[in-house]
C-alpha cells in the first residue's frame, strides 16, 4: 500500500473514532438528565472532549 494512502487512511480512522467517541459520550451524559441541567452537562462534555483532543 502506498505510504500516502496509508497515512490518509490512518488519519480518517482516527478522526472517525474521535467523532464516534464524542457522540457516545454526549449521548450517555445527556441520557437521563433533566432539561434544566442539560446545558451544564453539555458544557462539561465539551470541556472533556477538548481536553482529550488537545492531548496529541
Image (cartoon, rainbow, N blue to C red):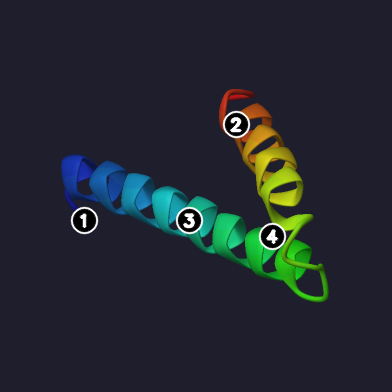
| Tag in front: 4 or 1 | 4
Q: Residue at x 67, y 28 (%)?
A: 51
Q: Tag 4's secondary structure?
A: helix
Between the residue at mark 2 and the residue at mark 3, the CA separation in whole angstroms equals 12 Å
Disc 1 versus disc 3: nearer the observer: 3
- Relative to the observer, which residue lies in front, 9 or 45? 45
The image's mark for residue 11 is: none
Work out whether 13 lies above or below 49: below
Q: Which residue is mark 1?
A: 1
The image shows residue 23 at horizontal and vertical percentages of: 56, 63
Pick the front one: 23 or 3: 23
In this orientation, which residue lies closer to the viewer: 4 or 27?
A: 27
For disc 4, the neighbor class at 10 Å (few under 14, some 14 to 19, many from 20) is some
- Do the numbered discs 2 and 1 sit on residues whose CB atoms are within 8 Å? no
- Numbered disc 1: secondary structure: loop
Q: Split into 4 quadrants, where in the image is the C terminus?
A: top right
From the image, state whether disc 3 or disc 4 is nearer to you.
4
Reading the image, the residue beneath label 4 is: 25
Q: Which numbered disc, 2 or 1, marks the residue closer to the eye?
A: 2
- CA distance for labels 4 and 1: 34 Å
- Work out whether mark 2 precedes mark 3 in sequence or the reverse, and give the earlier one: 3
Q: Which comes before the other along the chain, label 2 or label 1?
A: 1
- The answer to whether the residue labelled 1 contacts the one labelled 3, judged by CB atoms less than 8 Å apart, is no
Q: Which residue is at a point 48% across and 56% down the rendered structure image?
A: 19
Q: Residue at x 32, y 52 (%)?
A: 12
The residues bearing labels 1 and 3 have C-alpha atoms spaced at a distance of 26 Å
Question: CB of mark 3 within 8 Å of CB of mark 4?
Answer: no
**Image position, residue 13 (x, y; %):** 40, 57
Q: Position of residue 32 (x, y in %)?
A: 82, 75
Residue position for label 2: 50
Amino acid at each position: 500500500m502506498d505510504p500516502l494512502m496509508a497515512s490518509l487512511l490512518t488519519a480518517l480512522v482516527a478522526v472517525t473514532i474521535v467523532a464516534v467517541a464524542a457522540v457516545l459520550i454526549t449521548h450517555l451524559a445527556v441520557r437521563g438528565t433533566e432539561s434544566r441541567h442539560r446545558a451544564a452537562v453539555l458544557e462539561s462534555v465539551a470541556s472533556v472532549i477538548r481536553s482529550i483532543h488537545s492531548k496529541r
